[in-house]
Image (cartoon, rainbow, N blue to C red):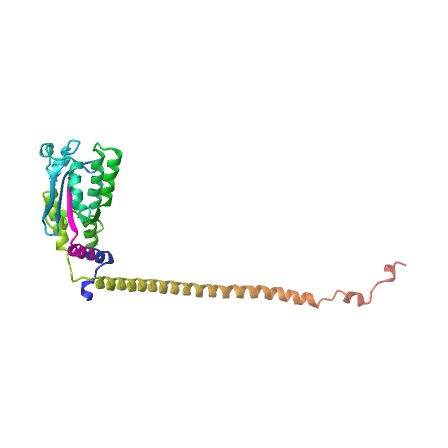
């Protein structure tokens, strides 16, 4: 049992369970989109496949604004290619029924989900329809393959899709969907179970308490050493105090032997000339 979780972090184990769950569910689809930019942009292509790789949706989307050359250099989609394509509102009305009851797996779901919102911002919609469409986008249940794969391999930085799938892609919606599906399939390890995760969690808890005990032992040792030094210092102070009190006591004893009334009891040795009469 332990060989499966040796050198495995808890985050990696959680990620493995997610990959296993995704592969075993029947309500999962994979989505990818190409856009006109990173911020304040629009979707210009979107695709969806199921876990068997079947195409459920694949369409260009005509954006309201021209596609910048910088975006074209990445995905190769230009204005001529999308000029006869439906706009985002029409595209969404066909896409939403496919997504609404599914778990939608996306490589960097935060980006694609945000671009679905931003694409509506350019549509000429009244407030009621606009709110309705944004609510539909909000209700779509998504999960991020990128973050999960990053946790799986214990990476401290986000991992590119090309690295995760092991090859380059065309950077088009359908090809990236299939590359994302490869990542999902390649990391399916059904022999890793919830029991393994719980075992790893217990082992990490044991290791954590062991480290804490060792830390406390070091602290106790240091405190014990400090206590010994303070006790030794205290002994020195006591000796010094006793020395000072010894001198004071000797002076007190001398003072105690002097009786002031003893002078009165002595006979006065005075000459007659000293007498006042």
Q: How many marks?
A: 0
Q: Could you say where residue 126 lies in the image, as x and y percent from the top left? A: 24, 33
Quadrant where the N terminus sits is bottom left
Relative to 222, is 92 on the left or the right? left
Asked whether residue 153 appears in the rendered view, the answer is no
Q: Is residue 171 above or below residue 227?
A: above
Residue at coordinates 27% horizontally, 64% vertically from top-left? 202
Magenta highlight on residue 225: no
Relative to 251, is 267 on the left or the right? right
Relative to 126, is 23 on the left or the right? left
Q: Is residue 251 above or below residue 44?
A: below
Q: Is residue 220 above or below residue 135?
A: below
Asked whether residue 249 appears in the rendered view, the answer is yes
Residue at coordinates 68% horizontally, 65% vertically from top-left? 255
* Residue placed furthest toward the right: 277
Q: In front: 247, or 215?
A: 215
Quadrant where the C terminus sits is bottom right
Residue 201 image-quadrant placement: bottom left
Q: In front: 226, or 64?
A: 64
Magenta highlight on residue 30: yes
Q: Could you say where residue 178 lies in the image, as x and y percent from the top left? A: 11, 48
Q: Could you say where residue 5 lies in the image, as x and y percent from the top left? A: 20, 62
Q: In front: 137, or 181?
A: 137
Residue 11 image-quadrant placement: bottom left
Q: In front: 13, or 229?
A: 13
Residue 95 image-quadrant placement: top left
Q: Could you say where residue 63 lies in the image, as x and y percent from the top left? A: 16, 34
Relative to 82, is 158 on the left or the right? right
What segment carries the magenta color?
17-35
């Amino acid at each position: 049992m332990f060989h499966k979780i040796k050198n495995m972090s808890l985050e990696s184990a959680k990620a493995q369970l997610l990959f296993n769950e995704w592969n075993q569910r029947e309500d999962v689809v994979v989505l990818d989109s190409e856009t006109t930019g990173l911020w304040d942009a629009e979707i210009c292509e979107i695709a969806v496949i199921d876990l068997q790789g079947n195409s459920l949706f694949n369409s260009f989307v005509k954006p309201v604004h021209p596609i910048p050359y910088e975006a074209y250099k990445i995905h190769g989609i230009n204005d001529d290619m999308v000029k006869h394509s439906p706009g985002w509102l029409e595209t969404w009305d066909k896409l939403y029924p496919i997504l609404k009851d599914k778990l939608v797996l996306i490589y960097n779901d935060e980006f694609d989900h945000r671009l679905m919102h931003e694409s509506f911002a350019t549509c000429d919609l009244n407030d009621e329809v606009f709110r309705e469409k944004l609510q539909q986008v909000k209700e779509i249940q998504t999960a991020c393959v990128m973050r999960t794969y990053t946790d799986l391999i214990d990476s401290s930085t986000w991992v590119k899709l090309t690295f995760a799938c092991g090859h380059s892609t065309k950077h088009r919606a359908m090809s990236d969907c299939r590359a994302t599906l490869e990542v999902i399939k390649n990391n399916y390890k059904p022999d890793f179970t919830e029991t393994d995760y719980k075992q790893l969690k217990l082992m990490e808890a044991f290791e954590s308490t062991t480290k804490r005990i060792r830390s406390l032992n070091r602290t106790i040792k240091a405190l014990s050493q400090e206590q010994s030094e303070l006790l030794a210092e205290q002994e020195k102070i006591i000796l010094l105090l006793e020395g000072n009190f010894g001198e004071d006591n000797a002076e007190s004893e001398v003072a105690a032997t002097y009786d002031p009334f003893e002078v009165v009891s002595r006979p006065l040795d005075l000459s007659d000339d000293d007498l006042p009469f």
